[in-house]
Image (spheres, rainbow, N blue to C red):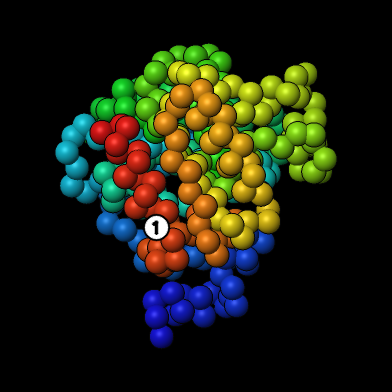
């Protein structure tokens, strides 16, 4: 039996991707049992702000040409679930490809609604910039990466400069964005998750990443799966189109046979053979961040 098959059987999953999306426990088990890439966890459970959820972990390359670019990864979970410990394998995957990687938690519904989780994300980026040198990272070469709701967070921070600027981060230090299966253009707010998360915004149109594209936006790697029925691929298509129209470099990927959860699982050693997401994404990020 293959490594993937053994792990799937041990987790008790008929289809690992679908079940991992449905509950935290299988994802926690996956993070514990799945084989991981070689990387050094440089720091754990570090405060980046005073609130109880403002914590992060740092993963560093074992053998890096210093200073290395910084990657800040935001996990998904419909803005109401998720925790950084369950994505340790993402931190290690990115670190193994030469990035000092920051995995922050951020405020979740109902404690936090828009734009609170974006303000948290900006503070995490500020922490990464302030402490980059201590972990062998370059504070002037930052890339923002996210999956699902986390891809929304990464895109908004990269495109709407207000949040990073308010946190004291120079937006020009963001060299590239990588969004995996992200919601970038989802008006009107008909989905209950979107309504509760964004419905109280004074400017609902201003909650959409596509509204902030300019010629100064960072280069973007935008990927989705053609089997994604949770966040439809048209979100990726719309943001990619807006960026191209503004003259921004975009690499757009639509992976056949990949659904919403398998997109992020493709970053893991277990499921990496399903789609070349990690290779293509990190090659793009290095091309723009060094």
Neighbour tally class for label 1: few under 14, some 14-19, many 20 plus, Cα within 10 Å: some
Relative vertical location of residue 268 with respect to residue 282 in this rendering, above or below: below
Q: Residue 256 at what x, y percent from top left?
A: 52, 61
Q: Is residue 209 left or right of residue 29?
A: right
Q: Residue 49 at what x, y percent from top left?
A: 51, 26
Quarter of the C terminus within the rendering: top left
Relative vertical location of residue 18 with respect to residue 138 in this rendering, above or below: below
Viewer-proximal residue, 1 or 53?
1
Q: Residue 20 at what x, y percent from top left?
A: 59, 63
The residue that appears at 79% across and 36% down in the rendered structure is 189
Viewer-proximal residue, 30 or 14?
14
Q: Residue furthest bottom?
A: 1
The residue that appears at 26% across and 44% down in the rendered structure is 98
Q: Residue 185 at what x, y percent from top left?
A: 67, 35
> What residue does disc 1 label?
276
Quarter of the N terminus within the rendering: bottom left
Residue 177: quarter of image: top left
The residue that appears at 45% across and 14% down in the rendered structure is 168
Is residue 116 visible in this depiction of the protein? no
Viewer-proximal residue, 162 or 186?
186
Is residue 204 visible in this depiction of the protein? yes
Viewer-proximal residue, 186 or 130?
186
């Amino acid at each position: 039996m293959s490594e993937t098959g053994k792990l799937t059987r041990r987790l008790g999953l008929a289809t690992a991707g679908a079940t991992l999306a449905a509950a935290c426990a299988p994802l926690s088990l996956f993070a514990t049992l799945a084989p991981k890439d070689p990387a050094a966890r440089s720091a754990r459970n570090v405060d980046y702000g005073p609130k109880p959820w403002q914590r992060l972990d740092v993963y560093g390359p074992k053998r890096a040409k210093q200073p290395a670019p910084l990657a800040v990864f935001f996990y998904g979970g419909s803005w109401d679930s998720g925790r950084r410990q369950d994505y340790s394998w993402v931190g290690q995957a990115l670190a193994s490809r030469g990035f000092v990687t920051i995995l922050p938690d951020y405020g979740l519904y109902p404690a936090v609604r828009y734009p609170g989780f974006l303000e948290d994300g900006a503070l995490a980026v500020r922490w990464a910039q302030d402490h980059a040198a201590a972990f062998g990272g370059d504070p002037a070469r930052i890339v923002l990466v996210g999956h699902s709701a986390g891809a929304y967070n990464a895109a908004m921070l990269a495109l709407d400069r207000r949040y990073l600027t308010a946190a004291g981060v120079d937006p020009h230090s963001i060299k590239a964005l990588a969004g995996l299966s992200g919601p970038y253009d989802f008006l009107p707010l008909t989905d209950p998750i979107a309504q509760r998360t964004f419905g109280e915004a004074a400017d609902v149109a201003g909650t959409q990443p596509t509204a902030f594209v300019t010629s100064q936006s960072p280069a973007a790697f935008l990927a989705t799966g053609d089997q994604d029925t949770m966040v439809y691929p048209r979100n990726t298509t719309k943001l990619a189109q807006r960026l191209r129209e503004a003259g921004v470099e975009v690499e757009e990927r639509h992976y056949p046979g990949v659904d919403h959860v398998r997109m992020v699982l493709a970053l893991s050693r277990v499921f990496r053979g399903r789609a070349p997401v990690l290779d293509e994404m990190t090659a793009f990020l290095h091309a723009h961040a060094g």
